[in-house]
Image (cartoon, rainbow, N blue to C red):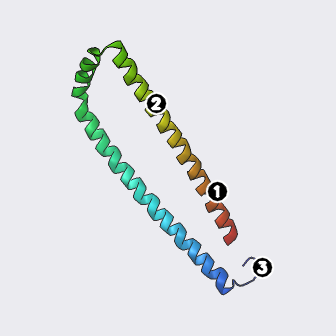
């Protein structure tokens, strides 16, 4: 196009497919953002409802033995580690998808 060349039918079709794919990704991202916003609002609401029960939880924790507290702490520590590993894997996947999108955009050009 820059040199006054016209796209072939196949190139034009690929271009349209990529444009449709980008539009679909934009729509999916918008949907996900809306879902995240809704969940965050729901979480804020439920967190506010849980604040009074926080004292009850602390009271229950104070009745646990040292061994029980250690076991509970270990359980939550392992859960945090697993969640961080999952987060890292998702970050890597997002980066890979971003690089693929850049590469596909380069093919279009």
Considering only order in the chain, which callout, 3 or 2, is on the residue closer to the N terminus?
A: 3
- If the image is split into quadrants, where does the N terminus sit? bottom right
Find disc 3 in the rendering and name its residue.
3
Provide residue 93's location: percent of width, then percent of height.
57, 51
Which residue does the numbered mark 1 point to in the structure image? Answer: 99
Q: Is residue 30 above or below residue 59?
A: below
Q: Secondary structure at mark 3?
A: loop
Q: Is residue 82 above or below residue 102?
A: above
- Of badges 2 and 1, nearer the viewer stands 2
The answer to whether the residue labelled 2 contacts the one labelled 1, judged by CB atoms less than 8 Å apart, is no
Q: Comparing marks 3 and 1, which lies closer to the viewer?
A: 1
Q: Is residue 9 above or below residue 52?
A: below
Q: Which residue is mark 2?
A: 78
Q: Position of residue 10 (x, y in %)?
A: 65, 83
In the rendered image, the residue lying farthest to the top is: 66
Query: Helix or strand or loop: what does disc 1 sit on?
Result: helix
Query: Tag 1 or tag 2, which sits nearer the N-term?
Result: 2
Residue 4 is situated, as x and y percent measured from the top left of the image, at: 75, 82
Which of these two is toward me, 77 or 30?
Answer: 77
Image side of residue 109 versus residue 58, left or right: right
- Identified at 40% across, 23% down, the residue is 73
Q: Could you tell which of marks 3 and 1 lies nearer the N-terminus?
A: 3
Q: CA distance from mark 2 to mark 1?
A: 32 Å
Q: Is 37 placed left or right of 62 in the picture? A: right
């Amino acid at each position: 196009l820059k040199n006054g060349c016209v796209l072939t039918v196949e190139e034009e079709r690929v271009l349209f497919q990529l444009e449709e794919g980008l539009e679909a990704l934009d729509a999916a991202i918008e949907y996900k953002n809306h879902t995240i916003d809704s969940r965050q609002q729901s979480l804020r609401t439920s967190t506010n409802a849980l604040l009074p029960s926080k004292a009850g939880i602390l009271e229950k924790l104070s009745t646990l033995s040292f061994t029980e507290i250690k076991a509970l702490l270990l359980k939550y520590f392992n859960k945090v580690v697993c969640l961080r590993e999952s987060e890292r894997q998702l970050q890597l996947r997002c980066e890979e998808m971003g690089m693929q999108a850049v590469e596909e955009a380069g093919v279009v050009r």
